[in-house]
Image (tube, rainbow, N blue to C red):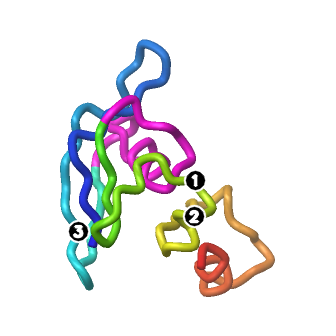
Amino acid sequence: MLKVEKLVVRYGAVMAVRELSLEVGQGELVALLGPNGAGKSSTINALTGLVTPASGRIVLDGKDISHVRTEDRIRAGLTSTPEGRHIFANLSVGENLRLGA
């Protein structure tokens, strides 16, 4: 369903993600774990199109979406729900999650 090949994310001279490769199959649940600065958010932001990877490939349902616009990735179902300070406090957890859909 989702395949990431040698993803690299840079912020200027700082390499936030270094050649990450992973595959997530249909129905699988995956967690990205690591300390602050490990590249978790940068990985998610690259997958959803919020940042442009320096290199690598992102494939969703067999289609290379590495250069697809953010809004088209969202339409394809690839979204994220931010933590804590970036949610709508007046909405329920379910409502916040549905916003990505």
Callout 2–callout 1 Cβ contact below 8 Å: yes
Q: Residues within 10 Å of mark 2 (few under 14, many from 20)?
A: few
* Residue receiving disc 2: 72
- Which corner quadrant holds the N terminus? bottom left
Residue 52 x %, y %: 49, 37
Query: Compared with residue 36, is residue 71 higher up or lower down, i.e. above or below?
Result: below
Residue type (three-letter) at the residue carrying disc 2? Asp
For residue 72, above or below residue 57? below
Query: Which disc number belongs to residue 24?
Result: 3
Vertical side of 95 occupied by 64: above or below: above
Q: Which residues are magenta?
A: 34-55
**Residue 38 drawn in magenta:** yes
| Outermost right residue | 90
Q: Which residue occupies the foreground of this view, 5 or 17?
A: 5
First in sequence: mark 2 vs mark 3: 3
The x and y percentages for residue 54 are: 39, 29
Q: Amino acid at mark 1?
A: Arg
Badge 3 marks a residue whose secondary structure is: strand
Question: In the image, is residue 49 part of the stretch drawn in magenta?
Answer: yes
Residue at the spot of label 1: 69
Which residue of the protein is positioned furthest toward the top in this rendering?
Answer: 13
From mark 2 to mark 3, how far is it between C-alphas? 20 Å
Percent from the top left, x then y, of residue 71? Answer: 63, 61
Q: Earlier in the sequence, mark 3 or mark 1?
A: 3
Left or right: residue 68 versus residue 66 is right
